Structure formats: C-alpha cells, structure tokens
Amino acid sequence: MAHRPLHRLPPAKQIAPAILAKLPAHGPHRVATCGDLLRLSLVDLAELCDLNSTQAAELHRNVCSVVYALPSRATSIVGAAGMGKTQFCLTVAVTTTLPHALGGWDAGVLYIDTEGSFSASRFREIATQVVSAQGRPDSTLASIIKNMTDKIHVLSAKTVSELRSRIEAIEPMVIQHRIRLIIVDSIAFVMRRDLADRRQDYQPDALSSNNQPPHRFGGGPPSGNNKGMSDLLTWEASNLKYIAETFQIPVVVTNQITTRFRPPTVMGVPSIASSDRYESAVTAALGNTWAHLVTTRLVLRYSDERRTTEKIPASHTPMNAIPTPLDRTITVAKSPIVPTVQFDYRISSSGFVSKSPPTL
C-alpha cells in the first residue's frame, strides 16, 4: 500500500488537486506515492504544500490511514512498568470490537496474556466511556458492551512452552472467531522468567563491589541458552508475521525494558584502561534479535524526571503515585513509513488518550 500513487487514493481519501500539483512528481525528490509522502517530515510537508501545521498533520494521517488499510505489521510497544502498555492494548482492543456504526471494526480480538494483567472490568470501563461519548442511549449501552466483551478471547500463557502452543493455535482461532487484532502482553515476561530459571544465580540488577556486571555461570552466559532464546524469538516473530500477512491483521506485542552494562568507550572503542568500570544503559528487552524482527516500535517514556501524584482508582494501577499526563510521551522509534515523532498522552477512564498533536 505504501507504493500506491497519491492520485489513485480511495474516493473518501483523495487529495485535493491543488495540493497534488504542488508535490514534485519527478526527479530524486519526487513525492508520487503514499510512501514518498509519509517519509517527509511534517515541516517539509507543510512547506511543499503551503499548509499550516494542522493541515499538514491531517494530510499525513489521511495518507497513513490508506497505507494501513490492510495492516499486516508487527508493532512492539516498549516501556517500563506502569507506563500504560496494557492500557494501550485494552484501548485498541475496544476500538477493534466497537460496532461499525460507532467507528470500530466490529471484529474479534485474540489477547494472549502472559502477566495476568488483562482486566475485564477495565475493558468494560473503557468501552462504556467510548460508547457513551457517541451519544448512545442508556437502553442500548448494556447490550453493546456485552457484544464487545464477547468478542474478546483471552488466553493465558505462563511459560515459554504455553506461549508457543498459544501461537501455534492462533490460525484456527482467527478463522473461527473472525479475529482482526492479535495482542501478546507481554512477549518479554515469560522469556526473561524462563531465562532466569535457567540461570539461578543471575541477578540482573546487582553489581559486585568493583562495579562490574554480575557473574553468571563461569563468568558468562551459556551460549546454548542464548542461541535457544534467539531461535525461539525468531520462530515467534515469524509465526506472528505469517498470521499478520496471511490474514491481513495487525499484531501488537508489548515488551519490557532492561539495563545493559558495557565498558566505557573512547571514540567508539572499548577503553581497556577503564575495563574495571562499567556503564549502564536502559534499553528494550530481548536484545537485537527481537528489535530487528518487529516492523514498528513505539516507546513509552517519561518526558522528564519529575513525578507527581495523581489520584486514580486503585484498581487501575498497583502504584500509589504515577506520573501526571504531561509527564509521559509516546515516540515512534521505528517505522518503515512514518518519521520519528512523539506526542504526550495520558491514561484516563477512556483508556490511552493523546494529549497533543505529534511533534518531530
């Protein structure tokens, strides 16, 4: 869909001829397809088409909706605990099960829960807020929510073997229940727990007295475990991508963050003189193998180090203090068609809600 010519968009998504005329159709900087336009920054798009920032963002969203009309991509949601990864999943699940008349897909959702974090009551709360905002009468609200809830199919996977068996069983479920969205929350939880069980003396957050990374079996991780984990991640990603491409449905997978240790570098080269000291960096879990396997990566993080308290029902979060809405941002860190953008978001009774338009 990214190769679709801009002058051949569906009638409801067509771009005004005056705007098309301003886009270069030839040469090294031509903008003739959806992919060409989506590679432009919002600033460049506004300058080329003589639009303001709001109009440029609307044009970008319009073309993006055409490219993702048949979404066959694996999207990874990365963030620390409490950032709203599960809330994001519940919100997109509500959108998928929402009736067509209310702007949804009116389709089924397969939710593979590895952490036990799926909350049926929270799903119903988000669904109730979304449906009520559409002005539906109270007399029909209960039946709509029940129909949406019936479309959610939750499978538990507490171990790596259970997760593998769940993934193997996806294809018949997609056909039987008309699944249009697959969620795995989270892919890292069972993988890291399985790896920790194999390395009984591995302490990822501990440092020895000389600030070196914690010792493992014989001073380093067994290569067989790492190889097996890499192979399993590749198998999982391949199967999820196969389902996404075969049935043209999106796959959303949440991932955790971890701390990695490495020796200091001088001009990109590890410093031998400082090899007894290690630097730490926060990064997505599961390493480079998983990072290269997903198509799109969204990163949830605090916009600054300031945290303040916000009163919300205890059922929504295990934390007593969470960041205020303006403290959190979501960033498109990896995408084949969308530039790197970020925007503020908040978690409300309506789920995962954007607070601001995207910024570069």
Image (cartoon, grey):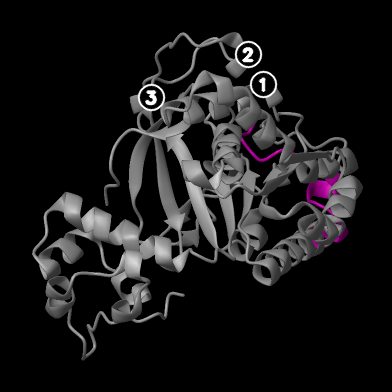
Q: Is residue 149 visible?
A: yes
Camera-side mark, 2 or 3: 2
Q: Is residue 293 left or right of residue 283?
A: right
- The residue at the point 24 percent across, 69 percent down is 15
User: Which residue corresponds to mark 1?
Assistant: 121
Instruction: Say if mark 2 contacts mark 3, CB within 8 Å.
Output: no
Q: CA distance from mark 1 to mark 3?
A: 22 Å
Q: CA distance from mark 2 to mark 1?
A: 9 Å
Q: Count residues near mark 3 (Cα–Cα under 10 Å), then give few for <14, some for 14-19, many for 20+.
A: some
The earlier-in-sequence mark between 2 and 1 is 1
Camera-side mark, 1 or 3: 1
98 vs 62: above or below = above
- Using the image, tell me which numbered label, if any, was put on residue 325: 3
Residue type beneath disc 1? Ser
- Using the image, tell me which numbered label, if any, was put on residue 315: 2
132 vs 176: above or below = above
Secondary structure of the residue carrying tag 3 is helix
- The residue at the point 44 percent across, 68 percent down is 67
Q: Which residues are magenta?
A: 209-227
- The residue at the point 40 percent across, 80 percent down is 4
Secondary structure of the residue carrying tag 2 is helix
Q: Count residues near mark 1 (Cα–Cα under 10 Å), then give few for <14, some for 14-19, many for 20+.
A: few
Q: CA distance from mark 2 to mark 3?
A: 18 Å
The earlier-in-sequence mark between 2 and 3 is 2
Residue type beneath disc 2? Ser
